């Protein structure tokens, strides 16, 4: 094994220019995988950003629910009925709908996600949103997402904007980033939400439920499903988040596109690595024939080629990782798309890269079988 490693290492660095060219090509293919998986992960994370901002165990939504931004409403009475369960500690009303934002100074028009919040700030685990809600006065005021599009104008406390043609003052800022649902977001108390959205006070996008300490939310969910009418669906928080992510990844075009792009990136990586290995092995056919003549068996010969491909992958992975980290930060700073490098993502890409290495090695090793000692004479 030590001999195989030495030969593979020497082969990899004998021609440094060729090695650098190979590493550059393979790094590019790994970078493509990083980017597509990063976009796919951002799609999943972005789909549940708003739900992640609340502390709850169970959600009650319409039977026709697909995702929060366009959720059909449920009657508030369903949430009140759920509170009758002995293991339910408290309930929270959540409303979400689209609106039109117009910057007062420039008259630029943008889409806005209006978020109507119940008067129970202990349900809000987004610190800035909770503090912003507590800062709301008695007038027509809202909390503006400071990740909103630049067409919103200055993202600062004290400015005003027109929401559905009604002037609204911004009393606080919070960070969310509703990339998939609108150009920006404004959170309001439920009274102002009802006024600006035109929605009835009895209509809710979702009802959030917190169970008593020590109680199993899954058990409560089963009871509520049996108790509540069939016009609503009841999920645990995790179940709702998985459904929301699944809709964006498997149904919405953006998720399907990123999944296909991951496959394309992997294919590109296999092709590039195969070309690098095939060229490298073709240039060393006489050397492999010599090794065969010296008594090296097929496993040793194939091991040299496979080890060399692993060396190329490992040397290519680090620059791809560093470049991907920089690009993720750049993409977030420009678009506020929630892309971030995590240990899990890096580990997944490394595993995928090694799989690419395995496939490419198997395809390229076919040439080694043709190395014949008789061709040396």
Image: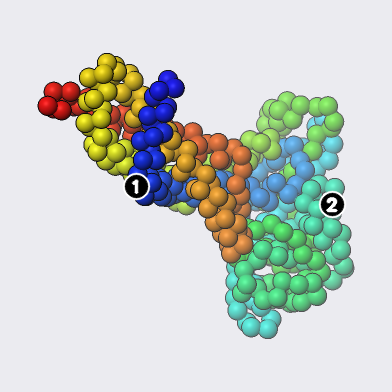
What residue do we see at 72% from left, 59% from top?
175
218 is higher (above) or lower (below) than 53: above
- Residue sitting at x 71%, y 65%: 146
Within 10 Å of disc 2 (Cα), the crowding (few <14, some 14-19, many 20+) is some
Residue 18, numbered label: 1
Figure check: 376 above or below 157: above
**From where the camera sits, is residue 77 visible?**
no
Report whether 145 appears left or right of 353.
right
Residue at 53% over, 46% down: 321
Identify the residue position indicated by label 2 in the image.
121
SS for dot 2: helix
Quadrant that contains the C terminus: top left
Q: Where in the figure is residue 46, as x and y percent of width and height?
A: 60, 51
Q: Is residue 265 above or below residue 183?
A: above
Q: Secondary structure at mark 1?
A: helix
Q: Residue 309 falls in which quadrant of the image? A: top left
């Amino acid at each position: 094994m030590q001999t195989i490693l030495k030969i593979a290492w020497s082969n990899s660095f004998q021609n440094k220019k060729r090695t650098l060219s190979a590493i550059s090509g393979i790094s590019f293919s790994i970078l493509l995988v990083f980017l597509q998986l990063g976009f796919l992960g951002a799609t999943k994370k972005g789909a549940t950003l708003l739900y992640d901002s609340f502390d709850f165990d169970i959600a009650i939504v319409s039977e026709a629910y697909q995702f929060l931004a366009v959720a059909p409403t449920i009657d508030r009475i369903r949430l009140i009925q759920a509170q009758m369960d002995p293991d339910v500690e408290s309930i929270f009303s959540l409303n979400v709908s689209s609106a039109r934002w117009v910057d007062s100074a420039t008259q630029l028009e943008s889409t806005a996600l209006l978020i109507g919040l119940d008067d129970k700030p202990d349900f809000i685990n987004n610190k800035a949103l909770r503090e912003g809600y507590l800062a709301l006065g008695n007038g027509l005021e809202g909390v503006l997402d400071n990740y909103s599009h630049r067409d919103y104008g200055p993202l600062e406390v004290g400015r005003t904007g027109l929401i559905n043609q009604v002037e609204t003052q911004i009393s606080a800022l919070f960070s969310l980033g509703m990339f998939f649902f609108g150009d920006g977001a404004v959170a309001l108390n439920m009274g102002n939400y009802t006024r600006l959205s035109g929605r009835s006070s009895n209509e809710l996008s979702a009802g959030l439920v917190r169970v008593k300490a020590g109680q199993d939310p899954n058990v409560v969910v089963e009871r509520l499903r049996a108790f509540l009418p069939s016009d609503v669906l009841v999920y645990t928080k995790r179940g709702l988040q998985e459904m929301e992510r699944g809709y964006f990844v498997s149904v919405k075009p953006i998720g399907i596109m990123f999944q296909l792009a991951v496959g394309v990136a992997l294919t590109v990586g296999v092709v590039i690595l195969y070309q690098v290995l095939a060229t490298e092995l073709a240039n060393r056919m006489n050397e492999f024939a010599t090794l065969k003549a010296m008594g090296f068996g097929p496993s040793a010969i194939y091991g040299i080629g496979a080890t060399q491909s692993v060396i190329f992958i490992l040397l290519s992975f680090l620059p791809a990782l560093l470049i991907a980290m920089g690009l993720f930060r750049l993409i977030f700073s420009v678009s506020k798309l929630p892309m971030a490098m995590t240990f899990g993502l890096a580990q997944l890409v490394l595993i995928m890269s090694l799989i690419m290495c395995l496939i490419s090695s198997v395809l390229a090793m076919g040439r080694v079988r043709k190395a014949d000692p008789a061709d040396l004479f």
